[in-house]
Image (cartoon, helix red, strand yellow):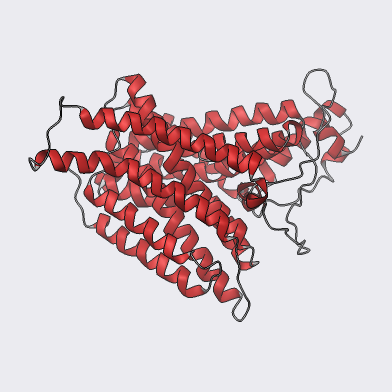
Amino acid sequence: MDSSAAALLEAGDGRAKEPRHLGRRTAHNLSSSSLRKKSDTSLVRKVPCAALRAFLSTLQEVLLGTRLFVLFPAVALAVLARYMQFGQVWLFVLSLIGLIPLAERLSFLTEQIAFYTGPTVGGLLNATFGNVTEVIIALFALSKGKITVVKCSLLGSVLSNLLLVLGTSLFFGGIANLGTEQPYDKKQADVSTGLLILGLLCQSMPLMLRYAVSAGEHSVSYGDAGLVLSRASSIVMILAYAAYLYFQLKTHRQLFEPQEVEDDGDDLVSEDEAVLGFSSAMIWLAVMTVMIALLSEYVVSTIEAASASWELSVSFISIILIPIVGNAAEHAGAVIFAFKNKLDITLGVSLGSATQISMFVVPLSVIVAWIMGVPMDLDFNLLETGSLFLAILMTSFTLQDGSSHYLKGFLLFLCYIVIGACFFVLKWH
């Protein structure tokens, strides 16, 4: 039995579930695969026991099959720092670093499961787990009543994807492909920006309602009208996102087909078949999710200590620092594919993630807060909402002609710098 067959052995009865051919990989999967590497199975093949060989092969694929494996010690160090009381700032930093490889491995595991479930269910899994780090951080922050941290971290993720991830990708891709046409599918970008504008509308209405009432221009029948409006808008946003998933996975799947990626001859993995068994992938998916939940709880509980130690506002840390670290893996993948002039994949990563957070994670947080009895609304305040409006506007203008060059990316990146500087000078209240 070779190592690939051993990796497909199911835990318990030793039988392998037959994988399907995965005809379509999402942009997120392709982006994460750029950080994967082939594992050396020569030592594993020498293990005489078949069961142990299968376990070690699976362990090697999960923990060592990524270029980010060097960051995995941060996970153990974060847990050690928590129980040895090394200090809250160290715990915050180690937890953030540990989330980077865990998020990338989550994408790998959802893709492995998609080999057995088919592309539609795989797409739904990717939609569910694509931004699970942001979801879990939001849930822990809500449980502690830190509504502002939830809003800032989610806003920061959208801004990071639209301006930082997309901006740096277009910039470096333009530099690497000077004199070469850099086209992309404008239809995919139009769909994403349309959803982002709808999300912006839903977030703007409670803000405008608050200012209209405070200015005496209108009156409301009850005091929590903004909260009621936010909850109704959140339901609309989730319905719109569900329609988007049906549009993406069923009726107009061809618009979201990622570009073909040539083999460059390096040690990147070109995964046309599963390397993990279905049960193994499900178990590891649960393990990685639990580890992300654990580190996310550490981040939420220590963010104030880091803010006080670094003399930075919690809003700056939530809007700028946490999203930069949280998006590090997909950021690197987006830049790599921009270098290869595969901008459809780059756009699929940045716009897809921003759309998912804006149209799914944000309204989901409002609804979950409603269930928990936490009064979270869609009023993100004037400065935050204005920043989001300008970011979406700048991105829409940048992507309107279906081709790219380095100046477009540079301008997006400068927009992110200005917004970051604005929140840097703010003090926490």
Residue 72 visible (yes or no): no
Q: Which residue is drawn at 46% across and 64% down?
A: 167
Question: Position of 35 compared to 424: left or right?
Answer: right
Residue at the far top in the pictured view: 13
Depicted 8 relative to depicted 395: above or below: above
Residue 89 x/y as whole percent: 35, 43
Q: Quadrant of the C terminus?
A: top left
Residue 50 visible (yes or no): yes
Residue 298 x/y as whole percent: 40, 34
Q: In which quarter of the image is the N terminus?
A: top right
Depicted 268 relative to depicted 238: above or below: below
Question: Position of 27 compared to 135: left or right?
Answer: right
Depicted 198 relative to depicted 129: above or below: below
Residue in the foreground of this view, choosing between 387 and 257 = 257
Residue at the far right in the pictured view: 1
Residue 196 x/y as whole percent: 42, 48
User: How many marks overall?
Assistant: 0
Depicted 141 relative to depicted 249: above or below: above
Q: Which residue is drawn at 77% across and 22% down?
A: 11
Q: Which residue is drawn at 47% across and 32% down?
A: 239
Residue 127 x/y as whole percent: 56, 38
Question: Position of 68 compared to 81: left or right?
Answer: right
Residue in the foreground of this view, choosing between 72 and 207 = 207
Q: Quadrant of residue 332?
A: bottom right
Residue at the far left in the pictured view: 216
Q: In which quarter of the image is residue 58?
A: top right
Residue in the foreground of this view, choosing between 250 and 93 = 250
Q: Which residue is drawn at 38% across and 51% down?
A: 321
Residue in the foreground of this view, choosing between 172 and 427 = 172
